[in-house]
Image (cartoon, rainbow, N blue to C red):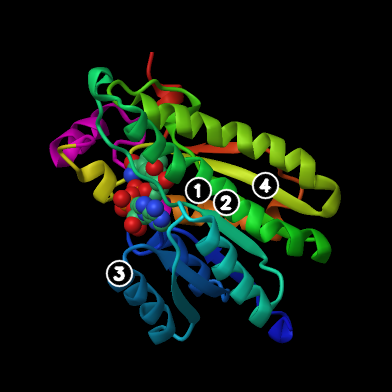
Amino acid sequence: MNDGGKLTVLLTGAGIGIGAATARAFGDAGYRVIVTDVLDEEGEGVASGINADGGEAEYHRLDVTSTEQADAVVGGVQERYGSLDAVVANAGIAHRVPLPELSDEKWDQTHEIDLKGVMRVCRAVAPAMREAGKGSMIAVSSIMGVAYGWDEHVQYSAAKAGVVGLVRGLAVELARDGVRVNGIAPGYIRTAQALSEEHSLGPEGLEQAAEFIPMGRAGEPEDIADVILFLASDAARYLTGQTIIVDGGLLVGRY
Ligand SMILES: NC(=O)c1ccc[n+]([C@@H]2O[C@H](COP(=O)([O-])OP(=O)(O)OC[C@H]3O[C@@H](n4cnc5c(N)ncnc54)[C@H](O)[C@@H]3O)[C@@H](O)[C@H]2O)c1
């Protein structure tokens, strides 16, 4: 079933940004890459790029707000390739919503994707990983969830802090079955999310941030991808329940 030992990874939100860079990093590392997103064209493009580079990848539509889709995509992949070796729960949105506009619907929308969406894919892959006695889950949090409070993004900070708790609880629940669960908390990374003037820093804000980031630059998606690859690898075999901050020194550097 496991094709001479080829490892399989599934990523959510992998059509653009951090997810796309991470998919390519896994492709370069020899994994079979299951790219998923709601952006079909972009997701197809990432998968065909990996294939063109001599790797193995396929695209599937997976809206992480749908339990049905999460279960169906994961089930189909497992049928063909066996238990997943790694899953990267990366899909996320960050909308600017001042408190007076923070309706139940806006709150729920972010939580459905950024927190419950993580749970849905982890829950879907867990039974086969437990049975296999191995597997690695990596969830994407944020510095806005582990340390900073982000004004006008309360629902985002709350959901991303929730990811840290999810990682801890699930890590303990699955540890005896050989399944590791970790998080990653990126700092300011140059992607569509951070470059949005409406919802985040915008291009100028990102340049200004570089001035107070100790390493002197905003992060690139590849800076995050390589750490996710490490978390999935056997090099991280004794690491579970942690959310690793990858921010160019931002949090330790501001006094
Ligand atoms: N860019 C940053 O500075 C930064 C910092 C900290 C954390 N993050 C987190 O990193 C992750 C990746 O973000 P990014 O910066 O690459 O942003 P991005 O906007 O470039 O990518 C987000 C991806 O999530 C997908 N997505 C959105 N809703 C979805 C849904 N319902 N189902 C499936 N996929 C969905 C999008 O289609 C897109 O591919 C997110 O969880 C984000 O919150 C980003």
Mark nearer the N terminus (4 vs 2): 2
The residues tagged by marks 2 and 3 sit, at their Cα atoms, a distance apart of 22 Å
In this figure, which residue is indicated by the disc labeled 2? 120
Percent x, y for residue 99? Answer: 28, 19
Tag 2 secondary structure: helix
Label number found at residue 181: 4
Q: Which three-letter amino acid code belongs to the residue tagged 3?
A: Glu
The residues tagged by marks 4 and 1 sit, at their Cα atoms, a distance apart of 15 Å
Percent x, y for residue 194? Answer: 26, 42
In this figure, which residue is indicated by the disc labeled 1? 117
Assess whether mark 1 and mark 2 are in contact (beta carbons under 8 angstroms). Answer: yes
In this figure, which residue is indicated by the disc labeled 3? 42
The residues tagged by marks 3 and 4 sit, at their Cα atoms, a distance apart of 28 Å
| Stretch in magenta | 199-223
> Which residue is pictured at 66% across the width and 60% down the height?
125
Q: Could you tell whether 86 is left or right of 135 in the image?
A: left
**Viewer-side residue, 210 vs 182:** 182
> How many numbered marks, from 0 up?
4
Q: Which three-letter amino acid code belongs to the residue tagged 1?
A: Gly
